[in-house]
Amino acid sequence: MTNPVLLVTGGSRGIGAAVVRRAAAQGYDLCINYSRDSRAAEELVGEVEALGRRAIAVQADVSDAQAVAQLFDRCTERLGRLSALVNCAGVTGRISSLAEAAPDTIRQTIDINLTGTLYCCREAVRRMSRNRGVIVNISSPSAYNGAPHEFVWYAASKGGVDSLTIGLARECADEGIRVNAVAPGLTETDLHASGGAPDRAQRLAPQIPLKRAATPDEIADPVVYLLGPGAGYVTGAVLRVIGGR
Ligand code: NAP
């Protein structure tokens, strides 16, 4: 029996890295995608191998269709048939009002978060179509609160992720492929510093009914649940993991 193979985009840091660790502990072999930080990705490969699983790190910008095709080819060649995909790669761009946002920030955010997720889902279902498979997309509650004064363009990209999750779930259901999303609330990762607000999780925590940000593991656990057989009748769902907000 071979282990199931999971590809995690943006798997080198933050929520993606937590998904990689949790999935490895559950018996998956891992393809860890990253864009720039090869050291973080290679260190995580070592952690997964120490658990007795196979792992590879593959650099690819998910907004580049050709690079995405090569990423999936490499995963299949090295680890075997793809069982599951988690689309975690994401950016916010620098926090500002829409009026102040640079066109490049808007374009890059949509390209990575939305177009990149579409490219990766497309490659996955092409490879899973004579197989059973499962996809989990990482969305955000900004899809319905709109993230005013922070990153309206990011919210729009995640609204798109919710829509594609529902559409693809219905399109692929009769091929045995389930597609769901997890919408994490405020989570302690470097994403906030990358957007220019390193104290954002601490600052906003009092507004959350549970009075704190989530840890990456607290988001990874529901993702791994959706990947597994316990979620066999769950498809087209967006699971909000938001501390009651
Ligand atoms: P993070 O700690 O900043 O990690 C981002 C990951 O995405 C890194 O592995 C990064 O790789 C990768 N990445 C960035 N651009 C990429 C590209 N073009 N191609 C491939 N990989 C790319 O962020 P995070 O907080 O874990 O976010 C993960 C997901 O959760 C995102 O989709 C985000 O929108 C979503 N989310 C986060 C929060 C939160 O509060 N943190 C809340 C709701 C939703 P490199 O390091 O190599 O660049």
Image (cartoon, grey):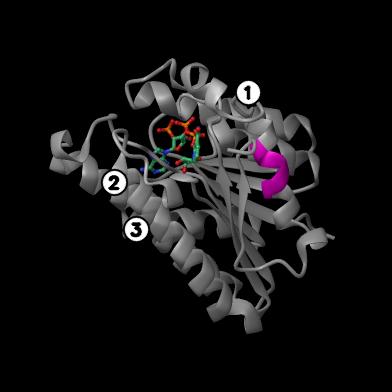
Q: Which residues are magenta?
A: 219-223
Instruction: Residue type at mark 3: give it.
Output: Thr
How far across and how far down the image is residue 85, in percent?
Answer: 59, 56
Report which residue position mark 3 lands on: 115
The answer to the question of whether label 1 and label 2 lie on touching residues, with beta carbons closer than 8 A, is no
137 over 126 or under it: above or below: above
Q: What residue appears at the point 58 percent right and 59 percent down from the top-left corner?
A: 76
Chain-order first, disc 1 or disc 2? 2
The answer to the question of whether label 2 and label 3 lie on touching residues, with beta carbons closer than 8 A, is no
Q: What residue appears at the point 34 percent right and 58 percent down from the top-left corner?
A: 115
Furthest residue in direction right, as rendered: 1
| Quarter of the rendering occupied by the N terminus | bottom right
**Image mark for residue 153:** 2
Asked whether the viewer can see residue 31, the reply is yes
Closest to the observer, 200 or 230: 200
Q: CA distance from mark 1 to mark 2?
A: 27 Å
| Quarter of the rendering occupied by the C terminus | top right
Instruction: Confirm whether the magenta stretch covers residue 221.
Output: yes
Chain-order first, disc 2 or disc 3? 3
How far across and how far down the image is residue 5, in percent?
Answer: 68, 55
Q: Callout 3 environment at 10 Å: few (<14), some (14 to 19), or many (20+)? A: many
- Choose mark 1 or mark 3, whichever is in front: 1
Instruction: Confirm whether the magenta stretch covers residue 78.
Output: no
Instruction: Residue type at mark 2: give it.
Output: Trp
**Image mark for residue 21:** none
Secondary element type, mark 2: helix
Secondary element type, mark 3: helix
